[in-house]
Image (spheres, grey):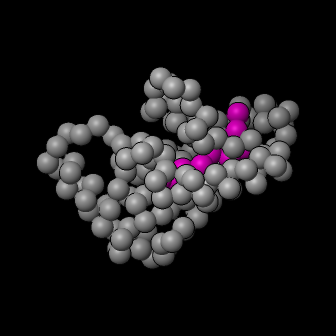
């Protein structure tokens, strides 16, 4: 993994950006994964690094752009958050333009359900789509309480 000095020439601030649905995985899987990576000297960005009052969108999108690798933890309620659906779009843009490495993790969901928006994962996506059709609610934070 990149050391602090080897990250600099490429403009990377983080080795890994983690995209996840907070209520599903924050107090378990993603925190444990971040600690394991950190123990190996891997600089990881999770939204817990944001200072209170920091505007969420530019901070998260900037962290994605400045990461060498993005880990997307798909979980049951991941698709129920607009932020969670927006982050992979930015991640894939960085993958195409900057060769960012993307690692999908399927936590309690099947890849087929994610790919085809089926099962509980698909239900979350449909609920979000219905809400957005009927309201102009602000985005819900991917890692946040909603």
Residue 56 visible (yes or no): yes
Q: As drawn, is 112 to the left or to the right of 107?
A: left
Residue 17 colored in magenta in the image: yes
Residue located farthest toward the left when viewing the structure as drawn: 134
| Residue 33 shown in magenta | no
Q: Residue 123 location in percent, x, y? A: 30, 67
Q: Does 59 sit above or below residue 107? A: above
Q: Which residues are magenta?
A: 13-21
- Rendering quarter of residue 121: bottom left
- Residue 71: quarter of image: bottom right
Residue 20: percent from left, percent from top: 52, 53
Residue in the image at 54% along x and 68% along y: 106
Residue placed most toward the observer, 119 or 11: 119
Question: Quick check: 115 above or below 86?
Answer: below
Query: Which residue is pictured at 41% across the width and 51% down the height?
Result: 85
Residue 10 placement: quadrant = top right
The image position of residue 31, as x and y in percent, is 64, 52
In front here: 35 or 97? Answer: 35
What residue lies at 73% left-to-right and 50% top-to-bottom?
A: 35
Going by the image, does 130 lie left or right of 106?
Answer: left
Residue at 48% x, 46% y: name it.
143
**Residue 76 at what x, y percent from top left?**
43, 65
Q: Main secondary structure of the magenta part?
A: strand
């Amino acid at each position: 993994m990149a050391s602090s000095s080897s990250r600099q020439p490429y403009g990377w601030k983080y080795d890994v950006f983690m995209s996840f649905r907070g209520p599903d995985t924050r107090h378990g899987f993603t925190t444990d994964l971040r600690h394991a990576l950190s123990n190996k000297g891997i600089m990881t960005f999770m939204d817990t690094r944001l200072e209170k009052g920091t505007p969420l969108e530019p901070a998260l999108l900037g962290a994605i752009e400045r990461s060498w690798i993005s880990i997307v933890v798909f979980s049951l309620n991941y698709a129920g958050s607009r932020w969670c659906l927006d982050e992979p779009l930015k991640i894939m843009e960085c993958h195409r333009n900057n060769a960012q490495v993307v690692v999908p993790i399927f936590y309690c969901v099947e890849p087929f359900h994610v790919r085809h928006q089926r099962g509980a994962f698909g239900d979350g996506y449909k609920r979000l789509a219905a809400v957005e059709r009927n309201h102009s609610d602000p985005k819900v934070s991917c890692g946040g309480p909603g």
